[in-house]
Amino acid sequence: MAAPSAAPIASNSVILTAQDAGERVSPVAVGSWALYDFANTIFSLNIISIYFPQFIVNDLKLVDAWYAFPMSASLLIVALISPLLGSFSDQAGSKRMPWLIGTTLLCVFMTASMGLFSDLGIIVATLVLANIGYQTALVFYDALLPSVSTTLNWGKVSGLGVGLGYLGALLGGYAVRLFLGEGSTNQQAFVPTALLFLAFSLPCFLFVRERRKPREAEAVSRRITWRDGFRQTWRTLGEARRVPGLFIFLVANFFYSDALNTVIVAMGVYSTQVIGFKSAFDVLAPAIVAAVVGSLLFGLVTDWLTSKRSLVLSLLMWVGVFVAAILVTDPTIFQWVIAPLAGVALGSTWTAARTMMIELSPPAKLGEFLGIYNLTGKFSAVLGPVLWGTTLLILDPRQYGRFAYQIAIGTLLLMVLVGLGLHLLTPNVRRQRA
């Protein structure tokens, strides 16, 4: 794959010249790559957003910290190992697909195991391992985007993946509900979720072919070992500071990802415990449909308007979502206005952020820098559930009611505002033909 070349044209603007604009990409490979987003979002919705939190809070009658803290622990582990795994995937002769397959199978096996045990300690341990597999797989999956697209349509293909992902969440959510009869427990959703994740991952494993890596990757591969893994992470962070605009983008991503990852974990419980819905899926379904539309639409917007400006629009939508969630309790407004707006914001944010990260990263170190991208996102995801769980542990909703959740949402709003302010300082990257 010919590497795109970037050149600054102003103090805060960059032109990215596409050397690969004439290359043909197989539609089957594009569709198969995007279908993996369809597959892994089934896990994200059913396990992280709906059934595991409800298993803890509704079935076992435990406090929110019982799902928030294990989630944070798994994300902390992912944050520490992601840059190293990305570095290994950049080595000359190293393939990303075996890593993607291995981490996906880890998630699938552990998710199924969650449904087969009755001991809470084992279930929580398998959740931690399942989430580690799911999150680390994203490093290798994101790094395959240039193999199924060209520089000029990164946003479009990225948006297709995110859009299919949320469609997978919608259809996967309904499919799992078919397995659950009247009186079923939330734990019974774990095994069918694992099977659906595996089934829809197979096309990506079979039909996506990696492009040849840049020659510079060979120099990277010679100095990476497991022994110096932590030093490699710090070294990569230092290199990120020397790439124009990349470090400030990563810091901004840390703050707004904090809020977004917490929404994914907590929205299901919030909709049932505070708004009063019988099933979290009643709220999540409109949000998911809107996320499909937002992802596809903002894939085109990202290519046309630039990823920076697209992200600004997305973060402004998040400000509106959190302000409305603090003030509004009417179920109809929450279901048909706030939830769809959150869906559009969520889909558009992931679409534009992934594209911008690839724009700013040196092609020879794409896996390594995507590991750092995951590190900042996962560290923020560690902080988010901890802040959420700690707030609700101090302000027990059983005593303070909705006020406790309003304060918790206020912390998410603050994180988005900080992230938006920092993001305004990032460069505006324009892509053009060679």
Image (tube, rainbow, N blue to C red):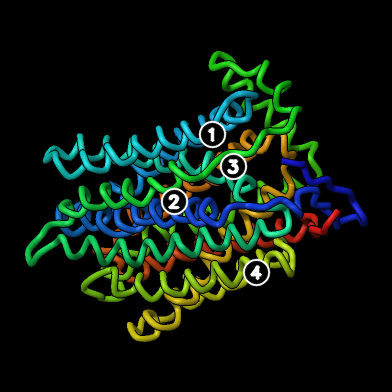
Compared across the picture, whether 136 is left or right of 66 comes to right
Mark seen at residue 263: none
Label 1 sits on residue: 96
Circle 3: element type? helix
Residue 180: x and y, percent?
Answer: 14, 61
Circle 2: element type? helix
**Is residue 101 visible in the rendered structure shown here?**
yes
Q: Upstream in the sequence, badge 4 or badge 2? A: 2
Label 4 sits on residue: 300
Residue 387: x and y, percent?
Answer: 44, 51
Compared across the picture, whether 243 is left or right of 100 comes to right
Instruction: Report the residue that reaches farthest toward the top.
Output: 227
Q: How far apart are marks 4 and 1 (CA)?
A: 27 Å
Mark seen at residue 143: 3
Q: Residue at x 37, y 70 (%)?
A: 403
Circle 1: element type? helix
Q: Upstream in the sequence, badge 4 or badge 3? A: 3
Q: Upstream in the sequence, badge 3 or badge 2? A: 2
Query: Relative to the observer, which residue lies in front, 401 or 325?
Result: 325
